[in-house]
Amino acid sequence: AKMVYYFGKKKTEGKGHPKALLGGKGLNLAEMTSIGLPVPPGFTITTEVCGDYYTHGKQLPAGLMDEVNEAVSELEDELGKKFGDNDNPLLVSVRSGAAVSMPGMMNTILNLGLNDTATEGLAKSTKNERFAYDAYRRLINMYGDVVMGLSHHSFEEAFDKVKKKYKVTEDTDVPAEGLRELCDAYKAVYKKQAGEDFPQDPIKQLQLAIEAVFGSWNADRAISYRRIEAAKGNSLIANLIGTAVNVQAMVYGNMGDDSGTGVGFTRDPNTGQNKFYGEFLINAQGEDVVAGIRTPQPVAEMGKWDKAAHKELMEIKKKLEDHYSEMQDIEFTIEKGKLFMLQTRTGKRNGIAAVKIACDMVKEGLITEKEAVMRVPASDLTHCLLPSFKPTARNAADLLCRGLNASPGAAVGKLAFTAQEARERHEAGEKVILVRRETSPEDVEGMSAADGILTSTGGATSHAAVVARGWGKCCVAGASDVTINEKAKKITVVNAEGQTRTFGAKDTISLDGATGDVMAGEVETQEPKLSGDFAQLMEWADKYRTLKIRTNADSPADSKRARDFGAEGIGLCRTEHMFFEADRIIHMRAMILADTDDDRRAALKKLLPFQRKDFEGIFKAMAGLPVTVRLLDPPLHEFLPHDAASQKQMADELGVKPADIKKRGEALHEANPMLGHRGCRLSITYPEILEMQVQAIVEAAINCSKKNIDAIAEIMIPLVGTAAELRILREQVEATIEKTKTAKKFEGELHILIGTMIEIPRACLTADEVAQYADFFSFGTNDLTQMTFGYSRDDIGGFLPDYLDSKILPVDPFQSLDQAGVGQLVEMGVTKGRSEKTKLKIGICGEHGGDPASIGFCNKVGLDYVSCSPFRVPIARLAAAQAAL
Ligand code: ADP
Ligand code: MG
Ligand code: MG
């Protein structure tokens, strides 16, 4: 196969070839050349060659250097320069460039082709000795670094010596004379460390540089980068075969004050504003801008320095956007007033900018509505829905450490060390951050009162993370550099510099849930805006999607918020969360402690009004839309306190002995509660719990009906594994509905369906039988994943990182549905269920309902709706549209 593709005046061979072959940089250099932009000519060695290099024990394939030599001759012809010439030498850069951009991860060598004679030649032809020796010293240094792996430190020492000798501090102030001496010093360093002279043969330099770029493909940092990106769901990056190598004629931004180099975005990547956003440096070579050696100037100021070059850059911005119909991230260099383009690629941007750019581009006629819908990564919409830190404040913040970015958002507050403290201080009007080693269901009230949550252990699916995400509350989890002393009300943090810092209840910290950063003090935030472009994009999404979007909510406030975000119903209302509030848990506990059915019923009777009120509120907030209420699911021991102090308190409240509570707790203890006495199994043993809940639902619906509020209830029975369970419980539900209607003398019509959560593999396997007794199915993919893999969701943290590292799992299956395994069960559940009832209504209500990839799958297998947390509703709307297009 052809190994080398030329781009230049005579021909652009790469145009129209796949990115996978030429890499992003190579393909775009060819495309820019072909649309007439000023690009220094050169050639691209394909990614296949890199693949070959690795499959053949790090040997360049036979014939490669012949093709390279040929391309070099063409380059020499086009430019009228020769490699190694002592008059007007050709110099090139040797640049890496994979199909997926890996910024800064691989190597690039500039000024290649210089040797002792060519440097003289360059000095002569440019009449600029200083420039020539500056280029040479950069080459020796870079080549030593990249090709030979020499220590950068020795080069720096040599440079410092020269600077000292000439009494200057800036690189740019060293005179030609000094740079000439520096080149000699660098060659000595090179020889001493490499054990041989700096190579004078440009072709040899080129060959070794090509190998070095191939080598950098498997440098540790490049491998890590690919692994991290793959874990984030970038599936393209996992399948790459290697990097391409771009050999390109040099242009010089360091030829004097009429030269310079810069980088930029064709639109603002933070705000999306249609305004060129970039920086440039006068008299500098490419990498200086990124390396931060000197402070660059904004491109907006460039006109003052070189009006023509600035104007040309703005014309190029337009040409690029017209060509790519996309915002570009570019590199350019100005050599003696002449502008050259060195790179372009799709510009990375945050969600806010993505939405604005997509909408603007539709208005500008660059893309269609459908393209705009496809353009915005659905998950990035979170940026639009949450408060965020002002970028300037964020940059200036005092960073303490970094934990897991468990739930995005920006939170600022003082430290609270227990849930109770968080609640009390919140009620007193304070903004607090709840800091815990890890949270438990007992902490939920404190979590809800806190502005943000910080935990020192636990992963992205830990309790804190899941709950926080559900609420759109900022959470940084597993910040292992933080040590919490709950008693002393202090945390200590060891920062990156190894300093230990201590913070107490009066100290303010700021959490960035999007990055996992923990910062000292108050960092300024900004509120989100949901109108304008955001609303426009949502409108387009709704036009093209077919899946319905519901939400998981268990309070009127959450329901209302979700409705504002566009939810078309509630897919999962978890009733157990309703029992944790202080005035209710006591009755719940009394119920659990009860020895007889009658005592149990008496306690449940006290819970009934609370439940009825909850449901009424939710039905009202969701008037006209379906509300799926799941009957009690968790094992009862979750409602009992575990430590002695709380047990004592509970005993006092209930007027019993602490020992009784301990005993009951022990009796309820299970070796494996996840697989224990929970879900529908509770209702089989304690039918009175089901009866109370159904009665509350029906009474709430009747009350709504009397107020002309259209309540649509879907009663969902959890954890069904056999048709018989559902048959028995359905009868009980139906009987309770009738009984309640009679008791209330209600004659009107109620909209109540009875269905089940499908979350046990056996339910999928026998879905046809289960469907006989179900008006609807809702896949509970959290439990289904747990039971299909046999992984406990709460214990996955122990091995998940290793599983991701060794690619046993591509992603956390609790975050993105395992389509190959769990997905088969879902598909089977759908097919079998609908073989019994063609029109069976089917949805999904696990964490997966808000994950774009999983939503794509749900769309494919024909679900009617997905249900996700309120804050993910807009994301789901967009993802559903993307799945449909
Ligand atoms: P990266 O992928 O890390 O950005 P690049 O291959 O783009 O690496 O190159 C690093 C720097 O060198 C960039 O700033 C680029 O503009 C500059 N550069 C690359 N090739 C040339 C060239 N032929 N002439 C001038 N500068 C170049
Ligand atoms: Mg670059
Ligand atoms: Mg479940």
Image (cartoon, helix red, strand yellow):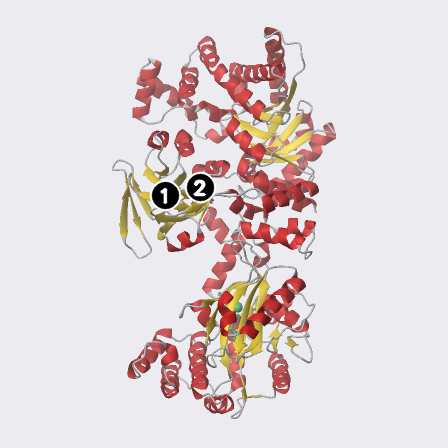
Q: Which residue is mark 2?
A: 474
x and y, in percent, of residue 492 in the image = 29, 46
Quadrant in the picture for the N terminus: bottom right
x and y, in percent, of residue 831 in the image = 71, 35
Q: Amino acid at mark 2?
A: Cys
Q: Residue at x 55, y 48 (%)?
A: 380
The Cα–Cα distance between marks 2 and 1, rounded to whole angstroms, is: 15 Å
Contact, mark 2 vs mark 1 (Cβ under 8 Å) = no
The outermost residue toward the left is 488
Cβ of mark 1 under 8 A from ligand 3: no
Residue 78 marker: none
Residue 189, image quadrant: bottom left
Q: What kind of element bears circle 2?
A: strand
Is residue 780 visible from the viewing direction of this image? no
36 vs 880: above or below: below
Circle 2 crowding by C-alpha within 10 Å: few under 14, some 14–19, many from 20? many
Cβ of mark 2 under 8 A from ligand 3: no
Q: Amino acid at mark 1?
A: Ser
Residue 429, image quadrant: top left
Q: Which residue is mark 1?
A: 456
x and y, in percent, of residue 561 in the image = 54, 33
Front residue of 416/580: it is 416
x and y, in percent, of residue 768 in the image = 69, 28
Q: What kind of element bears circle 1?
A: loop
Give the mark toward the camera: 2 or 1: 2
